[in-house]
């Protein structure tokens, strides 16, 4: 029995050794993706080009506008004279945001009335728009607070000390600088592993189905579980090697800390790899050609990525979508990754994720192995 | 028949949905016999073989291979059979030796037996000296013989060959059949499917299969005698189409069809045979040649089924 499984494992690695393309796929794209995510994936918005229309031409309006460019978040790319120029500008140029200060801005402020700052934003990229408008809000608030204190200081200096104020003191634990890389790098380990293992498992089995060797194996006295072990153990090992590779690149290159216990992470990785093998096996039972496997893999992987909490917060999703995330192994693995990397927490904290992942993995493996057995019987 | 046949097939049926691929097929094969399933693509040959190998579950009916029931003792059956599919399912990116080691290993052949088996298979297939070359570099004939080597490394008692010579050059086909005959002499039972008529002549016995049913069974000679009632004539005439139409209406003609540039015509009695040239001439057909010929399996097949068995690729 062991001899048969061993033969299959050897065969798989000999093929891998000969297949330059497969070796490339297992090494280069994961590292590249890690680097791309590390450098390019960020939620911060910097150097947003803005257009400015200032009808007021006052000390106050210039003061407000200068605060925008001062932070580095915005660049005044264009000074406009009227709104007609604005229409074509937002849609057709790379300037997504315009600020309009109407006439009477300063006067309103001096009278103690509400002064208006209009923000026109290109909503077709709603993410950037939302974040940029948030910054605009902050800057405008700060401006009005400072203006109010200044005025008070001029008329009733004694009162300034009595103005109530909340001083916001953000202290982001586990990632003090709110470094996007720290957030993304552990997540990338999970998503790369998912894509890689699901695909290589499904493809390897479907390819053997296509060339007929699977049939040739099935007429030998091999038992179904030997065949399943022989086809999954190699990809488990390959997946494990890739996790280590990507994790090492991510932590060394981007200096993401690893505070937790490697054994806790290893347990999470093992469970997660088994679940991805289950998905790959399941896809292989649904497909008879590699094209179908590709389409099915895509059909699974994209939603799995979106519904994992990798980039989009699960708590912001509608209830039904949130329920779906519970069926997603990546969801649990991401918590385990971020927990072990950034927080250094152990099983006492991660046990619900570990349990859920184990249960899901068990169900996935049982279903896919049963289906796989049936498809080869 | 043989008191202990190697393969017994009894009323085997396989349905795919509403399509009946194999329809109540029965036959028995003696030990050491070369038995051919001859029929056009899609006639149910491969489906029958795949059921006997345990790759497909029969819808109804039963079969035993070397005494083991294919449905209930599939694993025992697999231990004693070798199977070679028309695709020569080998790993292109493994060497000849690695392929042999892999399949030998799956059959539980290890150690000394494996080493000897591999040496034998390499010698048999003519691959000695190229054992470290990748399989993808081999010609069709070499791949075919390597696939045969992989299928018999564990010394099976029954060998299933599904279209074993598809896409192989004539010389290699000839060599392959020599190997098959040699194995048959060693007592291995061989069930082979083919749609090549010339190959079917190599079989000890044949079953002609069409649309899932066996239409005739016997030795190649028996089948020809059974199928052709009367004399077979070769007629070269012009125009050929008119000649075919006319000859079909001629008295005593039981069967007529086009073979290449000529007609093969079955005539029931001597009288009609003598009158045929005049009959055609009277209808404005120029007869260039008319002579009796020995029937081939192809004639028998056409006569029995009304269609040509030839066709390539899959079945």
Image: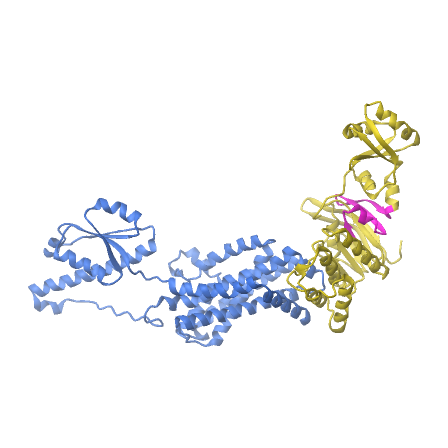
Chain colours: A blue, B yellow
User: Is residue B197 part of the magenta span, yes or no?
Assistant: yes
The picture quadrant where one finds residue A84 is top left
Give the residue at x 88% y 30%: B252
The image shows residue B294 at horizontal and vertical percentages of 88, 40
User: Does residue A148 show up?
Assistant: yes
Q: Is A198 positioned to the left or the right of B167 in the image? A: left
User: Does residue A377 show up?
Assistant: no
The segment highlighted magenta reads B192-220
**Up-down relation of residue B254 to residue A352 (above or below):** above
**Is residue B165 or residue A139 the one in the foreground?**
B165
Q: How many numbered marks, from 0 up?
A: 0
The image shows residue B296 at horizontal and vertical percentages of 84, 42
The image shows residue A186 at horizontal and vertical percentages of 43, 68
Which residue is farthest right? B270
Q: Is A150 positioned to the left or the right of A197 in the image? A: left
Give the residue at x 22% y 60%: A69
**Is residue B294 or residue A254 the one in the foreground?**
B294
The image shows residue B63 at horizontal and vertical percentages of 79, 55
User: Is residue B99 part of the magenta span, yes or no?
Assistant: no
Which residue is farthest left? A155
**Is residue A131 or residue B185 the one in the foreground?**
B185
The picture quadrant where one finds residue A220 is bottom right
**Is residue B306 or residue B202 the one in the foreground?**
B202
Q: Is B63 positioned to the left or the right of A88 in the image? A: right
């Amino acid at each position: 029995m062991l001899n048969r499984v061993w033969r299959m494992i050897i065969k798989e690695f000999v093929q891998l050794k000969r297949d330059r393309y497969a070796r490339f796929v297992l090494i280069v794209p994961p590292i590249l993706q890690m680097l791309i995510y590390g450098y390019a994936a960020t939620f911060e918005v910097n150097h947003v080009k803005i257009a400015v229309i200032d009808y007021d031409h006052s000390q106050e309006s210039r003061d407000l506008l200068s605060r925008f460019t001062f932070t580095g978040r915005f660049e005044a790319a264009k000074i406009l004279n009227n709104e007609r120029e604005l229409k074509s500008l937002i849609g057709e140029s790379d300037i997504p945001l315009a600020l309009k200060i109407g006439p009477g801005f300063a006067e309103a402020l001096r009278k103690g009335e509400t002064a208006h700052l209009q923000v026109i934003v290109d909503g077709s990229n709603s993410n950037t728009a939302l974040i940029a408008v948030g910054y605009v809000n902050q800057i405008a608030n700060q401006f009005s607070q400072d203006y109010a204190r200044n005025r008070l200081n001029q008329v009733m200096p004694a009162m300034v000390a009595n103005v109530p104020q909340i001083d916001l003191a953000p202290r982001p634990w586990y990632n003090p600088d709110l470094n996007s890389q720290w957030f993304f790098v552990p997540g990338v380990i999970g998503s790369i592993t998912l894509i890689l293992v699901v695909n290589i498992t499904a493809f390897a089995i479907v390819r053997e189905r296509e060339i007929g060797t699977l049939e040739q194996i099935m007429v030998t006295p091999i038992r179904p579980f030997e065949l399943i072990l022989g086809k999954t153990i190699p990809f488990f090992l390959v997946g494990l090697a890739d996790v280590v590779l990507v994790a090492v690149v991510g932590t060394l290159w981007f200096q993401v800390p690893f505070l937790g216990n490697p054994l806790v992470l290893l347990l999470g990785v093992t469970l997660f790899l088994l679940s991805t093998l289950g998905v790959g096996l399941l896809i292989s039972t649904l497909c008879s050609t590699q094209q179908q496997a590709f389409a099915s893999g895509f059909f699974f992987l994209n939603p799995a990525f979106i519904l994992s909490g990798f980039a989009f917060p699960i708590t912001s999703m509608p209830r039904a979508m949130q329920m779906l995330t519970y069926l997603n192994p990546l969801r649990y693995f991401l918590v385990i990754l971020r927990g072990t990397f950034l927080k250094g927490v152990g099983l006492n904290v991660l046990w619900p994720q570990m349990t859920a992942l184990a249960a899901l993995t068990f169900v996935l493996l049982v279903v896919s192995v049963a289906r796989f057995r049936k498809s080869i019987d | 028949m043989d008191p202990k046949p190697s393969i017994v097939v009894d009323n085997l049926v396989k349905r795919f949905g509403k399509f009946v691929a194999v329809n109540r097929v029965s036959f028995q094969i003696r030990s050491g016999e070369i038995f051919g399933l001859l029929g056009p693509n899609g006639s149910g040959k491969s489906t029958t073989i795949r059921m006997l190998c345990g790759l497909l579950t029969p819808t109804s009916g039963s079969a035993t291979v070397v005494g083991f029931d294919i449905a209930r003792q599939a694993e025992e059956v697999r231990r004693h059979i070798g199977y070679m599919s028309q695709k020569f399912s080998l790993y292109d990116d493994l060497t000849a030796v690695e392929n042999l080691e892999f399949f030998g290993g799956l059959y539980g052949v290890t150690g000394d037996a494996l080493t000897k088996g591999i040496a034998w298979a390499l010698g048999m297939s003519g691959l000695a000296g190229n054992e470290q070359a990748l399989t993808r570099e081999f010609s069709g004939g070499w791949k075919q013989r390597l696939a045969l080597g992989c299928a018999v490394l564990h010394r099976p008692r029954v060998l299933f060959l599904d279209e074993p010579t598809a896409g192989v050059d004539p010389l290699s086909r000839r060599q392959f059949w020599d190997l098959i005959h040699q194995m048959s002499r060693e007592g291995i039972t061989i069930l082979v499917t083919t749609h090549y008529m010339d190959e079917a002549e190599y079989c000890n016995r044949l079953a002609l299969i069409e649309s899932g049913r066996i239409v005739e069974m016997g030795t190649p000679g028996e089948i020809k005698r059974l199928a052709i009632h009367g004399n077979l004539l070769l007629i070269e005439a012009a125009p050929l189409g008119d000649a075919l139409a006319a000859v079909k209406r001629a008295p005593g003609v039981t069967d007529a069809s086009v073979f290449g540039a000529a007609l093969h015509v079955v005539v029931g009695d001597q009288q009609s045979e003598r009158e045929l040239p005049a009959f055609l001439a009277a209808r404005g057909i120029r007869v260039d040649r008319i002579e009796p010929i020995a029937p081939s399996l192809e004639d028998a097949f056409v006569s029995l089924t009304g269609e040509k068995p030839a066709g390539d690729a899959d079945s």
